[in-house]
Image (cartoon, rainbow, N blue to C red):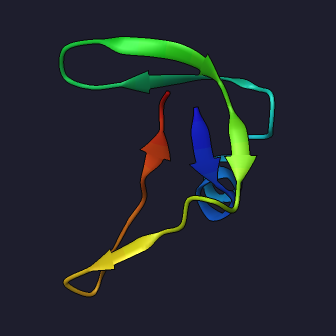
């Protein structure tokens, strides 16, 4: 799972750590890849974080 450096710092996630990503229906466990490729978006002046799951 790819995660932005800002979100990783905010959540205390380091590269290579196992993380749990969940929705209302299911969750997965994945290794974190901290990258600058993904960036925080601003929609209607609100910050929105995205993660990449291959």
**Left-right relation of 46 to 18:** left
Q: Nearer the viewer, residue 7 or 52?
A: 52
Question: In the figure, residue 39 lies in which quadrant?
Answer: bottom right
- Residue at 58% from the left image edge and 57% from the top image edge: 7
- Compared to residue 24, the image places residue 40 above or below, namely below
> Residue 27 versus residue 36: which sits nearer the camera?
36
Residue 43 position in % (x across, y down): 25, 78
- Residue lying at 71% horizontally and 38% vertically, measured from the top left: 33
Q: Give percent across and percent down for residue 48.
A: 35, 65
Residue 16: where, in percent of width, then height?
80, 28
Placement of 23 over or under 42, stated as above or below: above
- Left of 15 or right of it: where is 52? left
Q: Residue at x 69, y 62 (%)?
A: 36
Q: Name the quadrant of the N terminus.
A: top right
The vertical placement of 18 against 51, above or below, is: above
Total tally of numbered discs in the picture: 0
Picture residue at 60% right of the left edge, 18% below the top: 30
Residue 50 picture location, percent across and down:
42, 53
């Amino acid at each position: 799972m790819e995660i932005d450096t800002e979100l990783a710092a905010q959540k205390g996630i380091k590269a290579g750590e196992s993380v749990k990503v969940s929705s209302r229906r299911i969750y997965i466990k994945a290794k974190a890849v901290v990258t600058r490729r993904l960036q925080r978006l601003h929609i209607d002046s609100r910050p929105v974080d995205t993660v990449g799951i291959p």
